[in-house]
Amino acid sequence: MNSMTGAKALLAFLLVAVPSLYFLLPFCGWVYQCGCTSLPLGGAAKCNIHQPEGPHCPWCVVGDNDWVGLLPPALILGGQGGVMWWVARRRHARFWLLLVAGFVAYWVFGLGVAYVFKLVYNYPYFLGGP
């Protein structure tokens, strides 16, 4: 079997990207302990960015800056897409393997991007502690 077709790879990416975007705010709340939660439960309404005093969540801070707010999800989705593209190009690529690679890439790129933003914005909390 040759590399996966473009249609199947795109379908796999969409099956990974949609839940990735949906769970971005709960992921933010988990990583930064900022109060963000899923959209049905209020999304960023309880985020510490709404408090007068800091520290303020780095992802929500950049979310107030026009296009820069797209940077965290764009970096995560870009990383997922790159990993999934690489896997899809392999000779024996399987659809399920593409999905697994995409979800693993979400955690790897999500934590990596979150940690870089923690450093850049000097945010004191990350995964349960300073």
Image: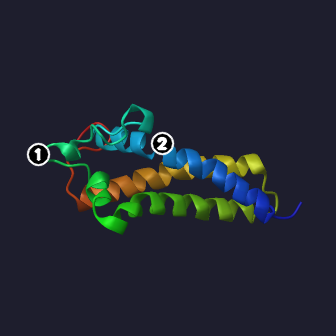
The residue that disc 1 covers is 52
In this view, the residue in front, 13 or 42, is 42
In this view, the residue in front, 94 or 26, is 26
Residue at 40 percent of width and 62 percent of height: 70
90 sits to left or right of 115: right
Residue at 58 percent of width and 52 percent of height: 17
Residue at 65 percent of width and 48 percent of height: 15
The numbered mark at residue 23 is: 2
In the picture, the quarter occupied by the C terminus is: top left
In the picture, the quarter occupied by the N terminus is: bottom right
Residue 127: percent from left, percent from top = 33, 40
Amino acid type indicated by mark 1: Pro
Residue 117: percent from left, percent from top = 30, 58
**Tag 2: Cα neighbours inside 10 Å, few (<14), some, or many (≥20)?**
some
Q: Is residue 35 above or below residue 59?
A: above
Q: What element does badge 2 sit on?
A: loop
Residue at 25 percent of width and 56 percent of height: 61
Q: Report the colour scheme.
A: rainbow
10 sits to left or right of 66: right
**Tag 1: Cα neighbours inside 10 Å, few (<14), some, or many (≥20)?**
few
Amino acid type indicated by mark 2: Phe
State which quadrant residue 112 falls in: bottom left
The numbered mark at residue 90 is: none
Q: Is residue 8 above or below residue 31?
A: below
First of labels 2, 1 by sequence position: 2
The mark lying in front, picked from 2 and 1, is 1
65 sits to left or right of 39: left
State which quadrant residue 5 falls in: bottom right
